[in-house]
Amino acid sequence: MPTPGEQAEQHIGETKGQPNHVHDLIHGLSTRFDALMPGSSGKARKPRKSRM
């Protein structure tokens, strides 16, 4: 019976990360954030000029 350490290392190298994982993660979080901020369009606004 393999030890827990051997079990943990048994499948190393058999899986690959998705190339667009970070993009998908950011997109998903952005969508959730936009749902929390109803007036937000998701785009940065330009700072207003002072009226003085």
Image (cartoon, helix red, strand yellow):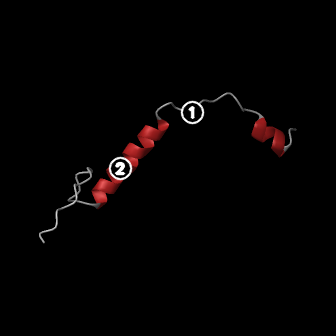
Q: Nearer the viewer, residue 7 or 27?
A: 27
Which percent across, then down, holds residue 4? 82, 45
The image quarter containing residue 11 is top right
Image quarter (top left, top right, bottom left or bottom right) of the N terminus: top right
- The answer to whether residue 36 is left or right of residue 7 is left
* Residue type at numbered disc 1: Gly
Image quarter (top left, top right, bottom left or bottom right) of the C terminus: bottom left
Which percent across, then down, holds residue 30? 35, 50
Reading the image, the residue beneath label 2 is 30
Which percent across, then down, holds residue 37? 27, 60
Q: Residue at 29% of width from left, 56% of height from top?
A: 35
* Residue type at numbered disc 2: Ser
Residue 4's label in the rendered image is none
Find out whether the residues at labels 1 and 2 contact each other: C-beta distance under 8 Å.
no
Q: Residue at 38% of width from left, 46% of height from top?
A: 28
Q: Nearer the viewer, residue 23 or 52?
A: 52
Dot placed on the residue nearer the N-terminal end, 1 or 2: 1
Q: Secondary structure at mark 2?
A: helix
Reading the image, the residue beneath label 1 is 17
Which percent across, then down, holds residue 36? 30, 60
